[in-house]
Image: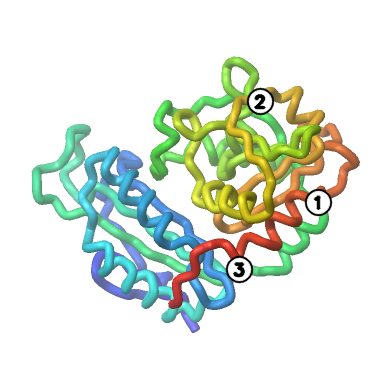
Amino acid sequence: MPRIAYVNGRYVKHSDAMVHIEDRGYQFADGVYEVCEVRHGVIVDLTRHLDRLNRSLSELRIAWPMTRQALILVIRETLRRNHVRNGLFYLQVTRGVARRDHVFPPAGTPSSIVVTAKSTDQSVIAKKNANGIKAITVRDNRWDRVDIKSVGLLPNAMARQQAKEAGAQEAIYIDHNGMVKEGAATNVWIVDHDGNLVTRPAEHGILRGITRTTLMDVAAKLDVTIVERFFSVEEMMKAREVFITAATSICFPVVSIDGETIANGHPGSMSQKIREAFFDVAEKTAI
């Protein structure tokens, strides 16, 4: 069966999907996006993803392309048409199509929306969980508003490519003070020597990940202490565990950073406990 995409009011073959050449997402990266996991036929943490979408749109003064309830119907229909039970959906909203000009288009210009969905290979995710992944550190060169989930991801793409060329799977951004920020597409956590989960505060400088937020609920259920504070590269390298979180992977253990082994070089018990408990705690919305 061919993949199906939703583009500005129409369900079309993925191979035939198109946006206008003067869509502001294409010309200015003037848009936002969300990626949401689908597992065992349900959408994971949909409410929190749509709440964050609302925040991103508000911060950039982009209008919703439709009502929230209508968007949920479109998401469900796109997933059904693609027969996704384990995978993800991607949605992107831009400021719309208008004559190329840096200033905003005239009031009333409709926003553009694209929704796609695909199944994912669960064996690949399982292998990364079993073996752990490698990461590198890079200096943060992104714009200041990384708390907005915008489509302006060129620095992230460059960082991920740098990681790939180094034989790693993620790049971890470091600020000008040598403190850990987040991954190119993930949030970063360490387990300190007291057994606490430590992650950088999300008030400014990193994205408030949805998986990050739900993980805090998981930790509370498991009676694990979470500490939101800054931590250095040196502390990360000496941590009992390092792992990264994202909607499509939940929790990947990091066993090597910049070629140096983390702890004993194997996935730790904390990331495993978090991962095993996550789905039971997360919100589940039927397709």
Could you say whether the residue bearing mark 1 is in a helix, strand or loop?
A: helix
Which callout, 3 or 2, points at the residue further toward the start of the chain?
Answer: 3
Classify 10 Å Cα crowding around label 2: few (below 14), some (14-19), many (20 and above). some
Residue type beneath disc 3: Thr
Q: Residue 116, relative to residue 195: is it above or below? A: below
Residue occupying the point 13% across, 50% down: 109
Q: CA distance from mark 3 to mark 2?
A: 33 Å
Q: Where residue 125 sits in the image (x, y, percent)?
A: 70, 61
Classify 10 Å Cα crowding around label 1: few (below 14), some (14-19), many (20 and above). few
Direction from residue 263 to residue 103 in the image, left or right:
left
Q: CA distance from mark 3 to mark 1?
A: 25 Å
- Most extreme residue toward the top, as rendered? 177
Direction from residue 14 to residue 263 in the image, left or right:
right
Residue type beneath disc 1: Ser
Say which mark, if any, is on residue 120. 3
Residue occupying the point 23% across, 46% down: 62
Which callout, 3 or 1, points at the residue further toward the start of the chain?
Answer: 3
Q: Residue 68, relative to residue 4: is it above or below? A: above
Say which mark, if any, is on residue 279. none
Q: Where residue 257 sits in the image (x, y, percent)?
A: 77, 35
Mark nearer the viewer, 3 or 2: 2
Classify 10 Å Cα crowding around label 3: few (below 14), some (14-19), many (20 and above). some
Q: Which residue is mark 2?
A: 231
When asked about the image quadrant of residue 80, the answer is bottom left
When asked about the image quadrant of residue 262, the answer is top right
Marks 3/2 in contact by CB < 8 Å: the verdict is: no
Direction from residue 246 to residue 202 in the image, left or right:
left
Q: Which residue is mark 1?
A: 269
